[in-house]
Image (spheres, rainbow, N blue to C red):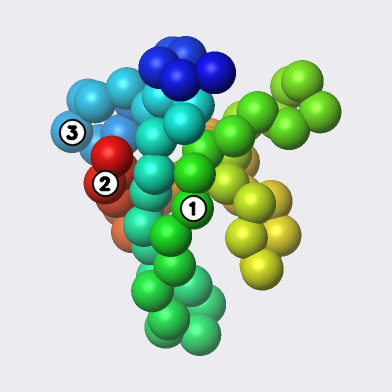
Amino acid sequence: MRAFDTGHKDRSGKSFLIGSRVSWIDKEGFPCEGEIILKYGCKIGVDSWEGFIFVCDFDSKFKIID
C-alpha cells in the first residue's frame, strides 16, 4: 500500500499518499500523529481518537511528515 496516490493534494500542491504519516493538533490542543490508511476499501484518511478523519477534510493543520 505504500506510495498509493489518493488523488488529493495539500495546500502546497504535494500529493497525499496512503502510508504517509501526518501530524496535526486535535480539538483539545494536543499534537497527534497517524498514518493515512485505506479503510473498508474506500475511505481514505486517518484513524484517530477523534474518529476517522477523511483526507478530503484535512485542513492546514495537517502536515505530511513522511
Report which residue position mark 3 lands on: 12
Compared with residue 54, is residue 38 higher up or lower down, i.e. above or below? above
Between disc 1 and disc 3, whose residue precedes? Answer: 3
Within 10 Å of disc 1 (Cα), the crowding (few <14, some 14-19, many 20+) is some
Q: Residue furthest bottom?
A: 28
Tell me residue 24's x, y (percent): 38, 62
Which quarter of the rendered picture does the C terminus lie within? top left
Within 10 Å of disc 2 (Cα), the crowding (few <14, some 14-19, many 20+) is few
Report which residue position mark 2 lands on: 65
Report which residue position mark 1 lands on: 34
- Residue sitting at 66 percent across and 67 percent down? 50
Tell me residue 62's x, y (percent): 36, 52
* Amino acid type, residue under disc 3 in the picture: Ser
Q: Does dot 1 land on a helix, a strand or a loop?
A: strand
Compared with residue 2, is residue 52 higher up or lower down, i.e. above or below? below
Separation (CA) of disc 2 from disc 3? 13 Å
Left or right position of 49 against 62:
right
Do labels 2 and 3 touch, CB within 8 Å?
no
- Residue sitting at 39 percent across and 44 percent down? 21
Tell me residue 18's x, y (percent): 49, 26
Q: Say the numbered circle drawn on residue 60.
A: none
Q: Does dot 2 land on a helix, a strand or a loop?
A: loop
Tell me residue 46's x, y (percent): 58, 46
Separation (CA) of disc 2 from disc 1? 10 Å
Q: Nearer the viewer, mark 2 or mark 3?
A: 2
Left or right position of 50 against 33:
right
* Amino acid type, residue under disc 2 in the picture: Ile
